[in-house]
Image (tube, helix red, strand yellow):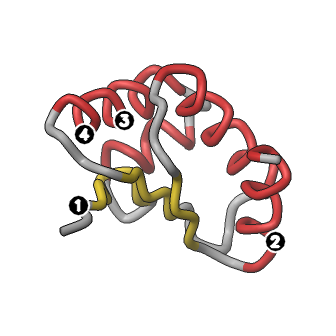
Amino acid sequence: MLVIGDKINILNPAVYKAISASNMSEIINLALLQSKAGVDMISINLGADLNPHMMEEVVRSIRDVVDLPICLSGSIEMIEAGLKEMS
């Protein structure tokens, strides 16, 4: 069974607030909590309305602290930005 952590979602009020304030510490904390809980993969869903640069920043921040595969959701521009950061 594959367990995907899906707490880093723009619909999560804490994530929305953190992203709006460019506060990556909250995003990092969510990634670490999910990793410690034993997820196999981290999902990032930032929707379609943000600047794709934010997806790059979120991916970079998570990859700095968690060594897990990342699943991306959002607009094609957001997904491309995340993939660019992961390559």
Image point (26%, 65%), residue name: 2
Q: Amino acid at mark 4?
A: Gln
Q: CA distance from mark 4 to mark 2?
A: 26 Å
Q: Which mark is residue 3?
A: 1
Q: Earlier in the sequence, mark 4 or mark 2?
A: 4
Secondary structure at badge 2 equals: helix
Q: CA distance from mark 4 to mark 1?
A: 10 Å
Disc nearest the viewer among 3 and 1: 1
Q: Earlier in the sequence, mark 2 or mark 1?
A: 1
Q: Residue lying farthest left? A: 37
Q: Could you tell me if the residues under marks 4 and 2 are in contact, i.e. CB atoms within 8 Å?
A: no
Q: Earlier in the sequence, mark 4 or mark 1?
A: 1
Where is the N terminus found, in terms of image quarters? bottom left
Q: Image height check: is 40 above or below 11?
A: above
Q: Residues within 10 Å of mark 3 (few under 14, many from 20)?
A: many
Image point (20%, 29%), residue name: 36
Task: Write down the quadrant of residue 25 in the picture.
Answer: top left
Disc nearest the viewer among 4 and 1: 1
Mark 2, residue position: 77
Q: Image check: 27 left or right of 47? A: left
Q: Amino acid at mark 3?
A: Ala
Q: Could you tell me if the residues under marks 3 and 1 are in contact, i.e. CB atoms within 8 Å?
A: no
Q: CA distance from mark 2 to mark 1?
A: 26 Å
Secondary structure at badge 1 equals: loop
Give how far across and how far down residue 57 sits, in percent.
Answer: 70, 36
Using the image as rendered, state which of residue 68 and residue 60 is in the foreground. Answer: 68
Give how far across and how far down residue 86 sits, in percent.
Answer: 74, 46
Q: Image check: 81 left or right of 42? A: right
Mark 4, residue position: 34
Q: Residues within 10 Å of mark 2 (few under 14, many from 20)?
A: some
Mark 3, residue position: 31
